[in-house]
Amino acid sequence: MTASGADGARSAETKARFDDIYDRPDPRAYFRRLAPLEYEIPHHAQPVFRRAAAERAALARDEPGQGPPAVLDVCCSYGINAALLHHDVTLAELYAHYTAPEVQDLTVGELVAVDKEFYAARRRAGALPVIGLDIAGRAVRYALAVGLLDAAFTDNLEEGPASAPLCRALADVGLITLTGGGSYVTHRTFAALLPCVRRPLWVSAFVLRTVSYAPVARTLAHHGLRTTADPSRTYPQRLFTDARERRYAVRAVRALGADPAGRESAGRFHTVLYESRPA
């Protein structure tokens, strides 16, 4: 999850930005800042992504000459989805780990050493390769350093095509995951990714109800993917930072034809899960 601008610096009522925590050398500030806002969407995504990854890997047995399909996490930041996908750890435990007093005075190098052991001890059997995509270079370097990602790229696909190295890596991707990045990436990113994919592709994306996913779904449809969602079932993302953000969310949800009652009106962003599969 990456954006440009300053946290809270908005001239009109809109979604707050937290750019100062998205590209640090390690995720301690990220967890400290988001803890009071009860940022929780990776927790809700964890069982969904695990199930999708397992089902997609099972299908790979019918793909002659192919190994396990890779997972591409779009807007991967510090590799949090990868941590939850392939390690016996919860989001609550990650909050506790990175906000614990004993890690606050560690250097980045010392924290990386701690985290290598932390994640290695919790690695689940049968983990698929995970590729990260995020323009936040320092964040993805951390995720690589501690072993959460097998490869990572910082291509800005909102502004240009995929680089040759990214395109080669995408050839083995069978599942794309996204949590919250729908506020920052559009159909342009998916349009740049899809021509490089060579295997049957699944997409599982949690998208804020303040954002229309229709342009992405249309782009996926052009590549043979059918997108389904249950708008009646939503997943909370986080508390609003202030009343302005709440008013923005309520208006945006209504503008897209949904009802904010009991969700955004109650004080939290909510997401919908969109799943795309070959038609």
Image (cartoon, rainbow, N blue to C red):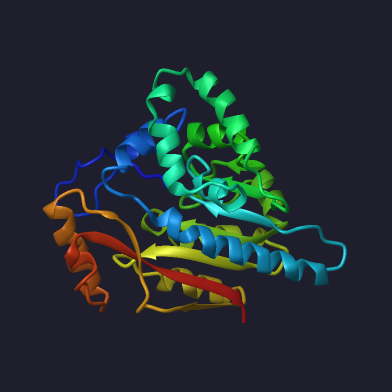
- Given residues 146 and 105, the one toward you in this image is 105
Quarter assignment of residue 255:
bottom left
Q: Could you say where residue 34 lies in the image, as x and y percent from the top left?
A: 32, 43
Quarter assignment of residue 266:
bottom left
Q: Determine the residue positioned at 33% across, 34% down.
A: 20
Q: Left of 42 or right of it: where is 241?
A: left
Q: Determine the residue positioned at 53% across, 19% down.
A: 110
Q: Determine the residue positioned at 68% across, 46% down.
A: 164
Q: Could you say where residue 10 lies in the image, as x and y percent from the top left?
A: 18, 46
Q: Left of 82 or right of it: where is 20?
A: left
Quarter assignment of residue 278:
bottom right
Quadrant that contains the C terminus = bottom right
Above or below, 25 relative to 75 = above
Q: Determine the residue positioned at 70% across, 69% down.
A: 200
Q: Could you say where residue 176 lies in the image, as x and y percent from the top left?
A: 58, 60
**Which residue is farthest right?**
65
**Which residue is farthest bottom?**
279
Above or below, 104 relative to 138 = above
Q: Could you say where residue 103 lies in the image, as x and y percent from the top left?
A: 44, 24
**Is residue 185 among the parts visible in the rendering?**
no
Above or below, 15 relative to 35 = below
